[in-house]
Amino acid sequence: MLHSRAYNNRHRSVLHNLVTHMQSTKNLRIERAVPEADSRLMPDLVVIDNDRKLAIIVDVACPFDNRQDAFLEKRNEKISKYTPICNILKTKGYRAIVDAVLVGSLGSWDPANFQALNLLGIPKHRKEHLIRKSISDVIRWSRDVDVEHMCGHRQYSKDVVLDLNQ
């Protein structure tokens, strides 16, 4: 796919914003398989608290369509995809929760995202900045995809890097 790097960067920019705004990144796995679940699926964010026996799985998506129906469909798709991991974790005694964060490719924010932000422990005072930054980044990457498509010139030189040590 011609623009797959830009699509990936758009997706990862939202992911980066989530990680940056989390209060704690302890026990956080980013885009990695969940060894406790013995699955090859790699959710975007996984927090496993062994002390509390709690597992939180959150996946990010930037659906092209900004209608509420499209958000609901994409959210259900993400939840269905990762429910098998939750079920495996539940058999091992974990309370497992799966959710999604959706930002439309034209910058719309799904109000249902707030549940995932709460699960990830993002403080109230950081949510507004997270939302604005994520929307802005998604619009910027969507614009880059469009301009590259129209004129054939790549609009960026660096990819979004997910590094907890930044």
Image: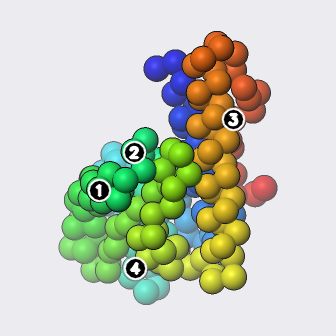
Q: Which amino acid does label 1 sit on?
A: Asp
Asked whether the beta carbons under mark 1 and mark 3 sit within 8 Å of each other, the answer is no
The secondary element bearing badge 3 is classed as loop
Question: In terms of sequence position, does the residue under pointer 4 or pointer 2 come before the other?
Answer: 4
* Mark toward the viewer: 4 or 1: 1
Q: How crowded is mark 4: few (under 14 residues within 10 Å), some or many (20 or more)?
A: some
Residue tagged by mark 2? 65
* Mark toward the viewer: 3 or 2: 2
Asked whether the beta carbons under mark 1 and mark 2 sit within 8 Å of each other, the answer is yes
Q: How many labels does the image show?
A: 4
Residue 28 left/right relative to 67: right
Q: Position of residue 66 (x, y in %)?
A: 42, 50
Residue at the far top: name it. 152
Question: In terms of sequence position, does the residue under pointer 4 or pointer 1 come before the other?
Answer: 4
Whether residue 24 is visible here, answered yes or no, is no
Residue 54: image tag: 4
Q: Nearer the viewer, residue 131 or 83?
A: 131
Q: Where is residue 19 in the image (x, y as percent from the top left)?
A: 63, 63
Residue visible at 34% across and 48% down? 41
